[in-house]
Image (cartoon, grey):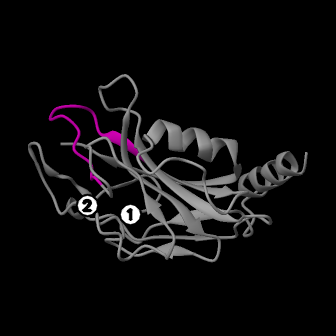
Amino acid sequence: MTRLFASVLAAGTALAGGSSAFSITSSAFGQGGTLGNEQVFNGFDCRGGNISPALAWKNAPPGTKSFALMVHDPDAPTGSGWWHWIVYDIPATSQSLPAGAGAADGRQLPTGAIQGRNDYGTVGYGGACPPKGDKPHRYFFRLFALEVAKLDVPADATAALIGFAVNANTIAVAEIQAFYGR
C-alpha cells in the first residue's frame, strides 16, 4: 500500500507541475528533442559517436535504495523494440551519469553500478540506428527508483529479465524521450 501511495503521489505531483516530482533531464537533448550524432550508433550503416548522453535526476521518492536506467526504442522493427542501454544497481546517492558513462568499461559509472547487454549484443550504450527511411524512432530514457539496493539477476541476464526484476521493485519512474530518424 505504501509503494502504491508513493507512486500515486509522485504521479499526481508530476501532473500538477510540482517542483518535487521525480524527474530526469539531459543536457544533450530536451524532452521530445532529437538525439545528436554523438548519441548515434557507430556500426551497421550508422556513423555516430556512440556516446551515451549526460543524464541528471532529482527528487527521488522516499525509500529509494537504488536506481536502474533502461533505454528502449519501441519502434524498432523487431516485434519487441530495441534495448539500447541497461544500467542497474546505481546507488541511491547518485544524481547523474556523465556523457560517456555507457562506455563498455564502465569507468564513469558510479561504484557498484552494472551495465547489462544491449540488443547489439554488447555491454554498455548502443546508440540510435533506425532503418533508413523509417519515421523518426522514439527513444525512452527511463530511470526507475527501486526499493532494493541490488537486483537479484545473473551477470548475463537479458534486458527482459533485468526489466522484470526492475518492474517488480519499482517505487517510481522518471522518463525523458528523444527522437532520431534518418
Q: Position of residue 12 (x, y in %)?
A: 79, 51
Q: Is residue 63 above or below residue 180?
A: below
Magenta stretch?
Answer: 126-140
- Residue beneath disc 2: 36
> What is the quadrant of the N terminus in the image?
top right
Residue placed at 80% from the left, 66% from the top?
Answer: 62
Q: Position of residue 5 (x, y in %)?
A: 87, 49
Q: Is residue 132 magenta?
A: yes
Q: Is residue 98 above or below residue 84?
A: below
> What is the quadrant of the C terminus in the image?
top left
Mark nearer the N terminus (2 vs 1): 1
* Residue that sits furthest to the right in the current view: 1
- Residue beneath disc 1: 29
User: What is the count of numbered marks?
Assistant: 2
Q: Position of residue 50 (x, y in %)?
A: 22, 60
Asked which secondary structure carries label 1, the reply is loop
Q: Nearer the viewer, residue 91 or 153?
A: 153
| Magenta stretch prevailing secondary structure | loop
Q: Nearer the viewer, residue 92 or 27?
A: 92
* Residue that sits furthest to the front in the current view: 154
Q: For residue 16, which quarter of the picture?
A: bottom right
Residue placed at 72% from the left, 60% from the top?
Answer: 17
Q: Is residue 52 above or below residue 140?
A: below
Residue placed at 29% from the left, 39% from the top?
Answer: 136
Task: Say if mark 2 contacts mark 1, CB within 8 Å.
Answer: yes
